[in-house]
C-alpha cells in the first residue's frame, strides 16, 4: 500500500508545534551532516505524549475513547491557526485556501486507505452523515420505482443505533424491506457471522426479491467485534447484491483499511475517533464504477451537481478546520515508532492483555476471541454486581465516573454484562496498565 505523505502542504499552515519539531529535528541529526551518516530516529517520548494530551482532565481516566476520540495539542494548535485565518479574512480563506486545503486532506486520506483516485474520497462531518448520503440514494431508488417495493436492505443486528434509525428514516419509509442479521453473543468465531449473513441474504432474495444494499459494519462498537468484512463483501458479490456499504466508524487508526482489498462500493470511517483529528471529520469512499450512481450531500448548497466531494467541501458557512488539519495529524502519528500501524498494534496487544488480566481477576471471560478485537475489548462483569438492566449499567457508569474518575462504556445483553474498554493511543495505555494492576 502506498505510504501517505504530508508534504506539499497548503500555504496557510505552518509548523503545528515548532518547539517539539525543532527538538525532533535536532535529535534526528544535523541537516548539514555528511550524507554518509545515517540519521538517528527519535520517536516521541512519554513526556511529550503527556504534554500533547495535557489538556485532558487529570482527574478522569478517559477509557471511552471510542465515543469522541482524543486530539493532541499540536493538532489543536494547527486547527486554531486555520480558524484564525478564516476569521481574519473570510473571503481570502474561501477563495484562496479552503478548497486546496481540503483537497490536500483528501489526497492524504486516499493514500491512507489505498483508493485508486482522490475523486473517490469525500470528506464529511461523521459516519452518520456518510450513511445518510448512501441511504438517501437507496431511498430514491425505491421512490423513483427503480427498485421494487419489498426489495431488501440487509444490515447487521449489531449495527450502530444511528445507522439503524437512518435506515428506518430513509429505506423503510420509501418502501424497502429491512432484514437484520441476528448474531450470537458472545461470539466465538467468524464462521458464526458468515453463516448468519448468508441466511439473511437468502431471506432477502426469497420470492423473487432482490437485495439492493447490504450495510456491513467493519468494527461494531456495542458489542465491539471486528467483522470479517472482506469475506462478507465477497459473499455479496457472489449472491448478486446490488451494492455494499461498509460502516466503519471506528476503523481508521484501529484496524486495517484498504479499499482495493475490501472491495466495497461505499466505505466510511471517522477520523476523530482513532486517528487523532478534532471533531468532527469522516471520509466517505465511493468506488468508481458504472454501476454506482451519483451520490449527493443531503445539505444542498451552491456546489450541488459538481460531484459529492465538491458538494461536501462547501455546505454553507461553518467551521471547516477539522477537515484541514489532516496533514498535521499525519505528522503527529509519524512521531510514533511504526506510525499509525505501530499505534494500532500496541493498542491491540495491550488492550487484549488488560482484558485477560481483568477477566481472570473477576472470574469472567472476554466477549470474543482476541483475534476478533481491535483496540477495544469486552470483559464480563462480576455477577456480584447484579447488573440486569440498562438502568443498572447507567448507575454503575455514573458511579465509576463520579466516585473513581473512570469513564467506561458499559453495555448489557440478554446473556451477559460486559464492559467495553476503549483505548486511546499510548497515553491511555500507560494509564490503564497502572489502573488495571490496582484492579487485581
Image (tube, helix red, strand yellow):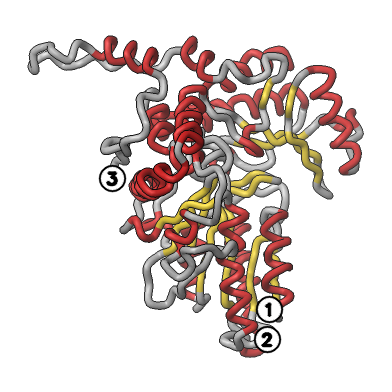
Residue 145: where, in percent of width, then height? 61, 88
Does residue 95 sit above or below 358 in this rendering? below
**Label 1 or label 3, whichever comes before in sequence order:** 3
Task: Tell me whether the residue at label 2 lies in contact with that at label 3, contact meaning CB atoms closer than 8 angstroms.
Answer: no
Residue 300: where, in percent of width, then height? 56, 65
Residue 249: where, in percent of width, then height? 57, 48
**Label 2 or label 3, whichever comes before in sequence order:** 3
Can I make out residue 344 in this image? no
Q: Residue at x 40, y 64 (%)?
A: 287
Query: Would you call the spot at circle 2 few (<14 residues within 10 Å), some (14-19), or many (20 or more)?
Result: some
Residue 414: where, in percent of width, then height? 84, 49
Residue indicated by mark 3? 2
Front residue of 399/72: it is: 72
- Classify mark 3: helix, strand or loop: loop
Does residue 348 sit above or below 31 in this rendering? below
Res. 377 image quadrant = top right
Amino acid at each position: 500500500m502506498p505510504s501517505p505523505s504530508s508534504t506539499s502542504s497548503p500555504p496557510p499552515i505552518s509548523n503545528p508545534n515548532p518547539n517539539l519539531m525543532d527538538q525532533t529535528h535536532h535529535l534526528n541529526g544535523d541537516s548539514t551532516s555528511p550524507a554518509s551518516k545515517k540519521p538517528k530516529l527519535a520517536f516521541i517520548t512519554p513526556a511529550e505524549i503527556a504534554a500533547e494530551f495535557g489538556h485532558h482532565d487529570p482527574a478522569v481516566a478517559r477509557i471511552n475513547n471510542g465515543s469522541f476520540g482524543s486530539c493532541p495539542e499540536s493538532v489543536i494548535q494547527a486547527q486554531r491557526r486555520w480558524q484564525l485565518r478564516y476569521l481574519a479574512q473570510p473571503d481570502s480563506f474561501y477563495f484562496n485556501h479552503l478548497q486546496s486545503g481540503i483537497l490536500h486532506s483528501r489526497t492524504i486520506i486516499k493514500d491512507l486507505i489505498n483508493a485508486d483516485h482522490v475523486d473517490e474520497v469525500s470528506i464529511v462531518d461523521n459516519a452518520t452523515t456518510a450513511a445518510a448520503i448512501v441511504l438517501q440514494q437507496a431511498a430514491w431508488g425505491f421512490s423513483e420505482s427503480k427498485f421494487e417495493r419489498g426489495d431488501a436492505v440487509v444490515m447487521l443486528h449489531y449495527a450502530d443505533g444511528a445507522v439503524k434509525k437512518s435506515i428506518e428514516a430513509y429505506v423503510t419509509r420509501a418502501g424497502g424491506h429491512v432484514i437484520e442479521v441476528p448474531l450470537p453473543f458472545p461470539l466465538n468465531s467468524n464462521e458464526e457471522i458468515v453463516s448468519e449473513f448468508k441466511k439473511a441474504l437468502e431471506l432477502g432474495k426469497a420470492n423473487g426479491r432482490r437485495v439492493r444494499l447490504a450495510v456491513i459494519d467493519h468494527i461494531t462498537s456495542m458489542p465491539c467485534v471486528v467483522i470479517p468484512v472482506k469475506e462478507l463483501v465477497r459473499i455479496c458479490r457472489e449472491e448478486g447484491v446490488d451494492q455494499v456499504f461498509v460502516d466503519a466508524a471506528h476503523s481508521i487508526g484501529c484496524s486495517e483499511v484498504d479499499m482495493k482489498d475490501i472491495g466495497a462500493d461505499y466505505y466510511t470511517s471517522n477520523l476523530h475517533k482513532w486517528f487523532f483529528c478534532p471533531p468532527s471529520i469522516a471520509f466517505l469512499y465511493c468506488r468508481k464504477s458504472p454501476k454506482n450512481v451519483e451520490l449527493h450531500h443531503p445539505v444542498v448548497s451552491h456546489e450541488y451537481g459538481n460531484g459529492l466531494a465538491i458538494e461536501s467541501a462547501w455546505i454553507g458557512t461553518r467551521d471547516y478546520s477539522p477537515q484541514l488539519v489532516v496533514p498535521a495529524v499525519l505528522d503527529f502519528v509519524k512521531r510514533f515508532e511504526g506510525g499509525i500501524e505501530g499505534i494500532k498494534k500496541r493498542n491491540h496487544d495491550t488492550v487484549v492483555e488488560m482484558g485477560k488480566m481483568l477477566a481472570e481477576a473477576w472470574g469472567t471471560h472476554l466477549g470474543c476471541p482476541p483475534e476478533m478485537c481491535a483496540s477495544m475489548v469486552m470483559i464480563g462483569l462480576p455477577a456480584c454486581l447484579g447488573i440486569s438492566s440498562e438502568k443498572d449499567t447507567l448507575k454503575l457508569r455514573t458511579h465509576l465516573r463520579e466516585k473513581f474518575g473512570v469513564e467506561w462504556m458499559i453495555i448489557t445483553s440478554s446473556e451477559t454484562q460486559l464492559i467495553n474498554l476503549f483505548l486511546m493511543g499510548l497515553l491511555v495505555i500507560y494509564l490503564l496498565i497502572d489502573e488495571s494492576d490496582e484492579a487485581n
